[in-house]
Image (tube, rainbow, N blue to C red):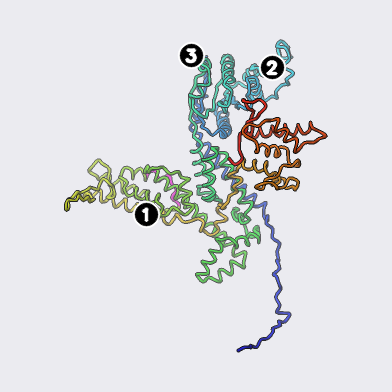
Amino acid sequence: MEHQRCYIYSPLESEVRPSKRQRTNIVQPQNLLAERLQTFREAWSHQEKQIQTTLENADRTTQEKILDFIKVAAQPDPEDSTTIPTGLIIAGPSIASYGPYFERLGRRIKDGTDCAYLVLSSSESPNLKTLLKNLVQKATSRAAEDDDDELLPPGASSRNGPKLLNFDLGHLQGWQKRNRAQSIVIAIQDSEAFDSNVLVEMIDLFHSWLDRLPFVLLFGIATSAESFEDRLSGNSLRYLKGQKFDVTQSDEIIEKLFSATIASAHVSLRIGPNFSRRILDRQKDHVQNVQDFLDSLKYAYMAHFYANCTSIFLKDGISFTHSSPDAFEAVRNLPSFRRWVEDKLDSLETQEIRKLLDSDRYLFDKISQQLRSSQQVLSAINIAVAFLSNVRESLQITPSVPLSSLWIRAASGEMVESPLLRETMLSIKKIPSNKFLHLLSSLRNVQEDHFSLELDTYRTELEELVKNSTDSAPLRSQHDVRNDSLRTTVVAQKVLLSKHKAALSEQDKAYSELVGRFHDEIQDYFNTTFVDPQELFLSEILIYDPKLPHIEVFQPKPRFAIERALSTPHDYLGCNCCGSSGRDGEAALSATQPATALLYQLYLESGSLINVSDLWSAFNAIGGDEDSESKTMALFQRALAELKYLGLVKPSRKKVDHVAKMMWKGL
């Protein structure tokens, strides 16, 4: 047919649909922000308690030894009254953690003794005079006297007698008598940053006052006691009576904090494996500071509760009336919600899906129910990780894997069928009876709320088998390599090796059956518990694990940012006067650019040694002001000083009128 009939359909006005659906409600991205802020504070306050308890427990052993040392030093010793009791605290390379550590130590000293505790740092002790000023000021809680008082003659008198200078230890002596302090504990927080002459002069002065002031010195050391002693003179060393104390290192404290905060079974918000791996790698490669780890963790909590409106459902006791329609709409757009609906659609639960999509009340009830269920699953994973770590530690499996690595693998869903888990289960099969008994004893410390292992039953059966054994040697299972033997046969002038099992005694057979049952139960427990947390319903609410977790915050690149700001200032200033017109997108030399940026671009074109006179001539030719050369010179000097402060240049010893170039862009 070459032609076909057709007609034009004109619908009635009542059948015409609107061109666009109208939004009936106003979206408020920051809805319930105050409630989410309160939820964040409640969640973080719980974490802060765990952090403080963990830090105190980590320092408890060492601080108790230091406290006993101070108590003994506070008692007068008539046989040895010419040396200063000195504690050498080996705190490790984490200089930034010294402050919080000495603060915790100070609280214990003040609570447990009648001694005064004073902390000095290198920044406030450039010389002996300033050190004594700060020491007297901290002890007496008085403002430092005016410098004009130092000009008074020593014989100048006041109402209470001779006028003492503000760095005279006589102030400290009078204060000690009024407060009846047993001893004055002075903690040198960063002793290796002190000038050696200042330390020597301080020790000599304190020794001369030892008959009037009972000093006790504590030195924070990053390297070793031997290197600290090498910095002091022989006379100063004879004035000290030292004792060394080793502080728990930062990597061990990080593992304990990780277990108490991230891998804990009693937290409302979990930090995901990718984010945890990032902050641990940063802690290992860039910084060794406990406080930076805690700051990263707190920032993650803040980011989750501020940027995710569905985090309101983590609030304890939240009701439907305190929730927001926007939060329910956000839940319906979560990937885990869509997967959950698709599973129900495959099961033909269409009525259930319709209620979830239409009724906020019904969805709220499901959210509350499923959050509790998912929380239990996550808690079970954390307990299983602690259980696995305890098993590996008890069996002394090498190489040792920290709990943080085990938790990251489990939280990533990579634990089941992993070589690490297979190695652990094989070690359980081969375990002898003495190690098996030790393993059962150590597993009592693990919570048993989420698994049904009858450890007491296994322990009773094992003790009964060991008691009935006629041999003093430990019982061994059939999988133990000691029960294997090699048999050599010669066939057609070829030597063949074959492995055979040795005959097992009745006790060994019973023990093998006991170990086999234990192995199977542990295997089933791990297989059912180690699920992928990302597949859980509403995992986006319970777990904070973004793909790009604020790289600029947690892995900053300050040098790259500084180089970019100086070479292309328009990227940061947002102006058109110094816009990009040079090669590779860099700003061309212009008088409108900041003086430091202009000088930096001239710096890039120079060699390793830069003639300051030539640099000034080029700077003046581009950005100079003919009417005010002095102003241009001031800008040049300030820009050069800023480059020196940034570490880009330094004075040259070869040529007085030159500066040495320290860094090249991109290298």
The reply to whether residue 182 is in sight is no
Q: CA distance from mark 1 to mark 3?
A: 65 Å
Element under label 1?
A: helix
Residue 566, located in which quarter of the rendered image? top right
| Chain part drawn in magenta | 440-449
What predominant SS class does the magenta segment belong to? helix
Determine whether, in the image, residue 563 is placed left or right of residue 576.
Answer: left
The residue at which mark 1 appears reads as 521
Q: Residue 591: image x %, image y %?
A: 75, 40
Determine whether, in the image, residue 261 is placed left or right of residue 320.
Answer: left
Above/below status of 509 relative to 157: below
Contact (CB < 8 A) between labels 1 and 3? Answer: no
Q: Nearer the viewer, residue 563 or 587?
A: 587
Front position among marks 1 and 3: 1
Q: Residue 256: image x %, image y %?
A: 49, 41
Q: Amino acid at mark 3?
A: Glu
Front position among marks 2 and 3: 2
Is the residue marked by circle 3 packed among few (<14), some (14-19), or many (20+) residues within 10 Å? few
Q: CA distance from mark 2 to mark 3?
A: 34 Å
Report the number of numbered marks: 3
The residue at which mark 2 appears reads as 165
